[in-house]
Image (cartoon, grey):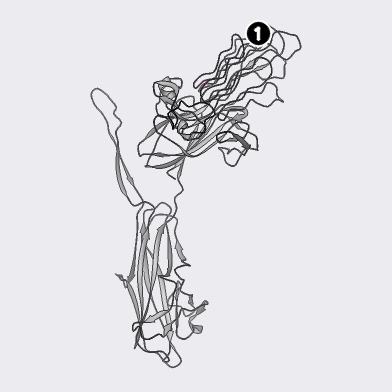
Amino acid sequence: MQKIKFNIITTAIIFAVAFCIFFTVSPIVLADSSATDLSITLDPVISIRVMKNNVDTDNLTLNVDPTASGRFIKDDLSVVVSTSNDTGYTLTFANNDTDNSMHHADSSITTTIPSITTATDEANFPVNSWGYSLGDITSSAQQFSSIPLSTATTTIKTTTTPIAEDSTNVTFAAKVDTSIPAGVYSDTVVFTATTNYVPPAVYEFDYSGAEQNFTAPKSGTYRVEMWGAGIFGGGSYTAGDIFLSQGTSVSLYLGQMSQGCTPYTACSGRSYNGGGSGAFFTQTNAPIRYYGGGGSTDIRLVGGQWDSEPSLKSRIMVAAGAGVQGRTNDTPVAGGGLHGYTTNAYNNGGAGTQTSGGAAGGAGATAGGFGYGGDSTTASPGCLNYNNALGASSGYYGGGGARSGACTTGTLVTAYGGTGSSFISGHAGSVAIESATSLTPRLDSNGIRCVDGTTDIVCSHHYSNKIFTNTVMIDGAGYNWTTVKGDQKPMPNPTGGYYALGQGHTGNGYAKITGPL
């Protein structure tokens, strides 16, 4: 009697194996009492075993008495997998090496039993060969396949949900005649169960007019994306990856799109998170815009009111807000990259940079500052003509406010506020502040004070040492910024896809945090 023996190896691969318990303590003082929240995080687990007749085994032996014409024999086993993974598992099968022939136990005997090379059924099974099948072992029409090599692993099952004791039957078969030496022939196959990929969670933040918070549910790398506000387009985009330990909390402030002014009244038009005010406007039928500047969107390590100095200093990423169109056919003044934008007509406000706010455009207007745009003004608030000044936008440093022209009937005297800059800790060209108590630029890698235009990446590192990698900075006109302004590239749209080339974000600010990656 010849014996054909299959040695079986099982492996289970999981993407996360740790069993973690963490405690989130949120004291709530109510008449000397406190409450504690307990959270338990269970990472996915997976197990695999091979069974024969409900008993765990690591081999399958077929005993066969060969005949001159060849005797066919088959037997099956069960591969049992359990996993708590949200998206289930994938079961694969292959030989343990690149030789799928069965070899005699006596190494001096070189005769082998090779695997079949093409799919076949029992009736046409080649003599002195072996194979496997996932079909019903009781069926004579069962189809058998070649044993896959270790370099060509075959998937034999995939599930999509958590599952316990999930069984897959695998049949092995051989057909041998009396022309080969008797004895034990064997080979080793490997079954591998792998947890399926679980897409990272996506946390989305829309404008609310108040501080919003995110707490990392697990330690890992998170992708942060931010869009500055822009009512007619032009909001900037920033993105980067950052490592956050489990339980780390950050605060998000989403910019409000430009706010309109009311004719015949004093014009505020300030937008949340730093957009500057527009100026007085008195014309009733002019086809022009009259708005304040757009607010920036940022992420901070310290919460509080949006204009709290300790909170502003803790910003580690900022996407600048946009300016406004002067007339319906004008292009909005775009939010900035490493520096903002300004126009050349009338007394327009200056652009924010990495180290200063934009200058005021004339008497009565105010300069931009750290986290806010300047306010604009008008030279002749009682003039019934196209007399208005659009607000400056917010950013890392905001743009300067503008001053509109003097009263000249029938003459367009609109002035534009400048726009703010964007900032990313870890993006070369950005300039971080020195500390939580100073707005002075930090020192570079040579101990020299950082300045606008630097290429030293150390200059960008926030004093907290929270640093992004794989950074992207696209201004509101669609230009990609490294240490300098580069070519235009499409800006991601938070609703999916991309904006048209050259177009910035439209609407209130937005933010996404994806991860752990």
Does the stretch in magenta take in 271?
no
Does the stretch in magenta take in 377?
yes
Q: Quadrant of the C terminus?
A: top left
Q: Quadrant of the N terminus?
A: bottom left
**Magenta segment boundaries in residue numbering:** 352-381
- Residue extending furthest toward the right: 410
Residue at 48%, 79% in the rendered image: 116
Numbered disc 1: secondary structure:
loop
- Residue extending furthest toward the left: 32
Locate residue 500, reporting x and y percent: 65, 38
Residue at 37%, 67% in the rendered image: 79
Given residues 116 and 34, the one toward you in this image is: 116
In the depicted structure, whether residue 407 falls above or below residue 444: above
Locate residue 36, reporting x and y percent: 27, 33
- Residue extending furthest toward the bottom: 68
Q: Is residue 447 left or right of residue 343?
A: left
Q: Residues within 10 Å of mark 1 (few under 14, many from 20)?
A: many
Q: Which residue is mark 1?
A: 379
Given residues 511 and 359, the one toward you in this image is: 359
Residue 441 appears anywhere in the view: yes
Residue 254 appears anywhere in the view: no
Kind of residue sitting beneath label 1: Ala
In the depicted structure, whether residue 384 falls above or below residue 4: above
Q: Is residue 439 left or right of residue 388?
A: left
The dominant secondary structure in magenta is: loop
The answer to which quarter of the image holds residue 278 is top right
Given residues 171 and 297, the one toward you in this image is: 297
Locate residue 158, reporting x and y percent: 45, 60
Locate residue 164, reporting x and y percent: 35, 59
The answer to which quarter of the image holds residue 136 is bottom left
Residue at 34%, 52% in the rendered image: 17
